[in-house]
Image (tube, rainbow, N blue to C red):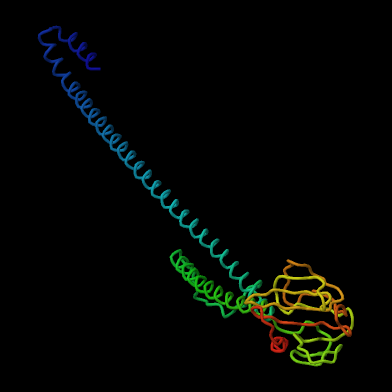
Amino acid sequence: MNMILLSSFCKKRGSIDICVPRAAALLLPGVAAFASLLVWAGYEIGVYQAEQSRSEALTVELREMLREERLQIDEARGEQRAHLDAMALRIAELQARVMRVDALGDRLVGVGKLDREEFNFASVPAVGGLEEVTGVSQNALELSADLQRLNSLLDDRESKLSQLEEQLLGSELIHEAHPSGRPVKKGWISSYFGKRTDPFSGKKSYHRGIDFAGKKGTEVYAVAGGVVERAKKVAGYGNVVEIRHTDGYTTLYGHNDKNLVKKGDLVSKGQLIALLGNTGRSSGPHVHFEVHKNGKIVDPRRYIRAP
């Protein structure tokens, strides 16, 4: 537009000397305005680029912060999972120990001949109480402390139950291996231990045991657990079963109609070992019962009276 004005101005005036200065005067404001525009545009571009740089720097910084936070969160989650896994493993171990304690307790109920309904280790113990309105959930530290207390409690109970088991089983084994009771459930004593008149010769003789008379075929039982030493016919005794026990004891059962065990058999207290008979030097159906201690014959009366 300035060029158009300049051309028109020069045509009207007709002189180049006059036209050029005046044209320059007309152009300077436009040039100044254009230069100002360029400076402003450069400034705005610079400000925009600076803002872009700052924005990119903030974006990178924010991304780095987010990445670090994610790493921290992942690390915290990993630690939490590891802690939960450890607690789950501890709970599994405690459950296994509780099962062992239950099994041991159930066994002791049987050994101690206790009431299984009263001492039922297979059922959950009965508990109760009013609900606390202000009750709050436990945190991980409290649960861990509870697990530690439960672990200590199980240690104490296992130790005490094991000691009780040893005592009960020890007394049970002693009772099992020590001669006590009668060899027959039915019958009566027909001859005691010691000096007596021989039923066949009428002379004084020494009776080495106690005779229990009864019906032929009556069951004869071992008065203690042990190993069968003899199960055969013996002169004068007829069919004999002899059992070796602990602490130097042996017991002998003679005149049997039939032996039901053989040499080397392991028998338990109260086990059926023979049928009452009349074999050997015998005047009628009975079982001749002897007790030996360390190879010496002893009076069976103190043992048959024991429970």
**Looking at the picture, does residue 236 appear above or below residue 4?**
below
**Looking at the picture, does residue 112 appear above or below residue 39?**
below
Residue 277 position within the rendered picture, expressed as x and y whole percent measured from the top left: 87, 79
In this figure, what is the number of numbered marks?
Answer: 0
Foreground of the two, 187 or 154? 187
* Res 238 quadrant in image: bottom right
Identify the residue at image location x=69%, y=89%.
302
Foreground of the two, 111 or 2? 111
Residue 37 position within the rendered picture, expressed as x and y whole percent measured from the top left: 23, 26
**Looking at the picture, does residue 41 appear above or below residue 89?**
above
- Image quadrant in which the N terminus is located: top left
Residue at the extreme left of the image, as rendered: 17
Residue 66 position within the rendered picture, expressed as x and y whole percent measured from the top left: 37, 45
**Looking at the picture, does residue 82 appear above or below residue 98?**
above
Identify the residue at image location x=54%, y=75%.
163
- Image quadrant in which the C terminus is located: bottom right
31 relative position to 111: left or right: left
Residue 138 position within the rendered picture, expressed as x and y whole percent measured from the top left: 48, 68
